[in-house]
């Protein structure tokens, strides 16, 4: 496998992919190691996770540089991800032990005790994503390990070196051999892993891949969790601080070069502030710096995958222009080496256009004028996805009136593109099934067992 630098297309390193029989062996060894790990005292498991956290901090410079070089994430944002993941680890360390505690739900007059205990799933297959490998990985492998599961982890092929770094952190933190295993490879390696006798599958990625995974594992009745994409809308009402709203929505649309499942992908603006919002929004976008992701002044890096820049985004722009849209900023792939695409703003867009229907996953946004909250709600609902939605308004009641009608896993009032470890991260429809984070993201790795206990 050739690991490419998306900033210039050069080969960073070549890495040997795991052969099918190696993947099978890793799952077998994980199965053999899991029982002993589950019987390890919780305090010992937590100490290893705490050491993993400490090593993340100690090696953050090298880890951030590796992430930026292979994914193209601006270096400041790579550091932000490594800082932010500490809060998630702390949350799991604080809350997991309580989730493992037995529950006595009733002691009947007949002398029968009714008790619930919680057992680990067993062997968890974690097929992860490249856009936030520390965030989305931590959401799975930290609670999985804390609850006594073994993990076989396949990072995205576009974040292979980061995945190798994560595996080294776990090894050096003291996780026992085979309790955390790394699978290196692309789609075929992932398919082989999912064909193996695992007890749970946790995937982060696109709807198309998630659907194929669901079809592949459905006959085995596994615990399946899919964290998929979104076509996340933001509505800006006519009572906002226009400049503040424009800055916030632009950041939500273009942060991480737009490569986020919860990035703002559609903007609806009330006609009462249309002109002023559009002016402020374009001013904000004009300040974004497209360039070398290792430069601390860069805010827009290259796309992680060549085809996003060369095919996908260009096709969305072409389709929009053919259907009557106008480009007010960007619209082109930057010539020369690397997978760069200009920050792009489109207006006169409609829902007949790909840019308003299909996930973009890049630095491109369509902005649409609406006459009322009802029209905004109707357009925001017009999607097969259901991950997040945002409303900007001075009125909480007005914002909630829109958000409560939307089939999404997360609603934002006067913010967007935000994740908290204390809240469940989930999607509706094509945005996935199951939840990570919060207590629900711990329970996902446990199986309840009911006991009816009656003495002699």
Image (cartoon, grey):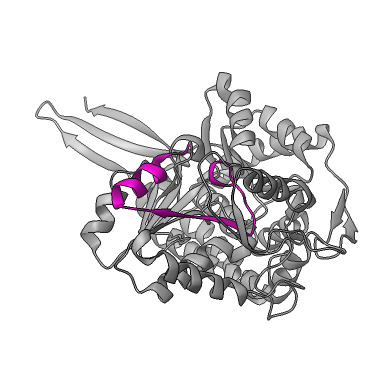
> Can residue 93 be found in the magenta stretch?
no
Q: Is residue 33 left or right of residue 341?
A: left
Position of residue 339 measured from the top left corner of the image (x, y, whole percent): 79, 59
Residue 25 in sight from this viewpoint: no
- Please, is residue 35 above or below residue 90 in the view? above
> Toward the viewer: 266 or 62?
266
> What residue is at 78 percent from the left and 46 percent from the top?
184
> In the displayed structure, does residue 6 sit left or right of residue 201?
right
**Magenta-tinted stretch:** 355-383
Frontmost residue, 133 versus 145: 133
Extreme-left residue of the structure: 109
Could you tell me which quadrant the C terminus lies in?
top left
63 displayed left or right of 427: right
Please identify the residue farthest to the top as the structure is shown.
219
Residue lying at 45% horizontally and 58% vertically, measured from the top left: 92
162, 447: nearer the viewer: 162
Rendered location of residue 450, percent (x, y): 32, 30
- Report whether residue 151 is seen: yes
Q: Residue at x 64, y 42 (%)?
A: 33
Query: Residue 385: image x %, image y %?
Result: 48, 40
78 or 108, nearer to the observer: 78
As drawn, 97 above or below 293: above
């Amino acid at each position: 496998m050739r690991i490419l630098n998306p900033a210039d297309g050069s080969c960073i390193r070549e890495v040997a992919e795991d052969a099918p029989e190696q993947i099978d062996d890793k799952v077998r060894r994980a199965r053999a190691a899991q029982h002993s790990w589950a019987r390890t005292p919780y305090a010992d498991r937590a100490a290893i996770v705490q050491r993993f956290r400490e090593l993340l901090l100690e090696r953050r410079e090298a880890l951030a540089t590796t992430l930026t070089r292979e994914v193209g994430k601006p270096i400041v944002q790579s550091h932000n991800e490594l800082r932010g993941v500490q809060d998630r680890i702390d949350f799991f360390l604080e809350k997991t032990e309580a989730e493992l505690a037995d529950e006595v739900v009733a002691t009947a007059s007949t002398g029968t005790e009714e008790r619930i205990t919680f057992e680990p799933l067993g062997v968890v297959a974690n097929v992860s994503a490249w856009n936030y490998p520390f965030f989305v990985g931590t959401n799975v492998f930290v609670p999985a390990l804390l609850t006594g599961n073994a993990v076989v982890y396949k990072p995205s092929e576009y974040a292979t070196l980061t995945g190798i770094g994560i595996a080294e952190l776990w090894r050096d933190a003291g996780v026992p051999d085979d309790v955390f295993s790394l699978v290196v490879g692309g789609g075929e390696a992932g398919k082989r892993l999912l064909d193996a006798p695992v007890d749970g599958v946790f995937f982060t990625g696109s709807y198309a891949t998630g659907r194929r995974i669901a079809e592949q594992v459905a006959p085995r009745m596994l615990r399946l969790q899919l964290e998929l994409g979104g076509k996340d809308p933001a509505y800006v009402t006519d009572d906002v601080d226009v400049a503040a709203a424009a800055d916030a929505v632009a950041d939500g649309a273009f942060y991480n070069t737009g490569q986020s499942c919860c990035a703002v992908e559609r903007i609806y603006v009330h006609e009462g502030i249309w002109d002023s919002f559009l002016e402020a929004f374009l001013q904000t976008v004009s300040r974004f710096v497209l360039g070398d992701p290792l430069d601390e002044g860069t805010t827009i890096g290259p796309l992680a995958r060549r085809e996003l820049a060369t095919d996908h985004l260009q096709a969305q722009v072409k389709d929009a222009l053919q259907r009557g849209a106008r480009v007010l900023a960007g619209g082109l792939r930057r010539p020369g080496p690397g997978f760069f695409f200009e920050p792009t703003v489109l207006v006169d867009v409609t829902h007949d256009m790909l840019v308003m229907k299909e996930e973009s996953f890049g630095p491109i946004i369509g902005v649409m004028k609406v006459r009322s909250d009802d029209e905004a709600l109707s357009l925001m609902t017009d999607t097969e996805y259901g991950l997040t939605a945002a409303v900007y308004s001075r009125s909480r009641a007005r914002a909630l009136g829109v958000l409560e009608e939307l089939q999404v896993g997360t609603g934002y009032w006067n913010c967007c593109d935000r994740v908290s470890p204390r809240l469940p991260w989930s999607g509706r429809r094509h945005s996935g099934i199951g939840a990570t984070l919060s207590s629900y993201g711990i329970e996902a790795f446990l199986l309840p067992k009911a006991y009816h206990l009656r003495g002699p």
